[in-house]
Image (tube, helix red, strand yellow):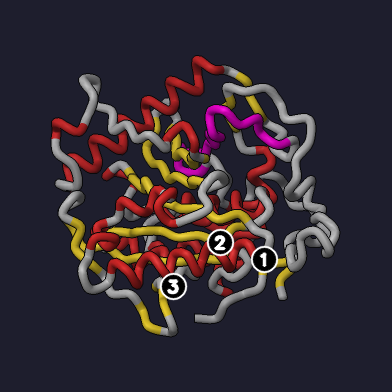
Amino acid sequence: MIPVRGNHRKRRGSLSRGAASTIKRVCGCLTEKRTEAMHITSFHTELVILPPARTAPPNIFRNTEFNRRRYELMLAEMQRLRGSVYLRDGAIQKHELTADGRHRLSVDEQSWHILLVDGAKRVKGCMRYLEEKRASRFDELWIRQSALTDCPVWGRKFRRAVEHEMERASRKQMSFGEVGGWAVAEERRGTVDPLRMVLATCGLFRLLGGCVGLATATVRHGSAAILRRIGLTPLTLNDQELPSYYDPRYGCQMEALRFDSDFPNVKYANAINELSDMMELMPLISCESRAPEWSGRLSGIDLPPAERPGRGALQPLAV
């Protein structure tokens, strides 16, 4: 069992030597130097958080800017980056973009976004977490649009497997959500940044009180492989793994993966804990005023076990 927080507080924005070395080793960034002293703004990039447009950010985020105009500009730039990356990869067609090159999705304003921003404040990477608060059945989920849904062989099993994950989240009194929209500018691939974004998203789960969820990940650029490495596992039904599948909408092979924020790969548990701690002071840009209270994790203190059991620490998953 690895505690979420230790007795000694490190300097904010700095990963420990072990956590930084883990990120460096897995990314294979052998040319990056002094990774053990990596700051959150290392290599001229930093992470910025966008909360859902109509959700007031919880008080645990202490570097919050309430600026609707800047929120809209950052969201639009994220959509342009995603559009350019997806178009270049052949995942979308030009007609799916707006006149100014944005790849707009209806869930964008309902989602949390982790943005990678360079020294010139340009968005160079993005990842989305959609908390499915209003969904009570499969047909109300965003993931229902997956090509696997209509598969004559696996479609029904996919639906049942997703519903089982929803039930598991409910039993654990955790949120259920979906991760997607991962895009990284070409010049930032092969650096620590893509993995740092993923681990920061896992850290976000911790700050929001934990999450059980799903991701449909492309095998392109090793995206699915990276997610598997940090602890995501294939979606299963009755111990049978659902196979990878071809999605004609994106023109690539995809995998349906599941995750539980309490059970990351043991190799990354410490890094996720540290990033979760650091994220309290990451820049967060909101277009809503501050929430008066928050029902999840507050300043590292969990709700009583009777209300939210098992939220005390990450449980490492050895894979």
Among the two numbered marks 1 and 2 on one chain, the one whose residue lies closer to the N terminus: 1
What crowding class fits label 2: few (fewer than 14 Cα within 10 Å), some (14-19), or many (20 or more)? many
Residue 282 x/y as whole percent: 62, 38
Residue 285 x/y as whole percent: 57, 27
Residue nearest the observer in this picture, 116 or 35: 116
In the picture, measured across the screen, residue 89 lies left or right of residue 27, that is: left
Q: Check residue 233 in the rendering and tell me which mark sits there, or answer none.
A: 3
Going by the numbered disc 3, the residue's amino acid type is Thr
Residue that badge 1 annotates: 172
Q: Residue at x 14, y 38 (%)?
A: 93
Vertical order, 50 against 162 (above or below) = above
Image quarter for residue 290?
top right
| Callout 2–callout 3 Cβ contact below 8 Å | no
Asked if residue 17 shows in the view, the reply is no
Point out the frontmost of discs 1 and 3: 1
Residue that badge 2 annotates: 212
What crowding class fits label 3: few (fewer than 14 Cα within 10 Å), some (14-19), or many (20 or more)? many
Residue 79 x/y as whole percent: 34, 32
Q: Residue at x 68, y 60 (%)?
A: 173
Q: Is residue 282 magenta?
A: no
Residue at the outermost bottom position: 239
Q: Is residue 46 magenta?
A: yes
In the picture, measured across the screen, residue 14 lies left or right of residue 130, that is: right
Q: Residue at x 32, y 31 (%)?
A: 104
> What's the magenta region?
42-58
Q: Residue at x 69, y 50 (%)?
A: 277
| Callout 1–callout 2 Cβ contact below 8 Å | yes
Dividing the image into 4 quarters, which one contains the N terminus?
bottom right
The secondary structure type at the circle numbered 3 is strand
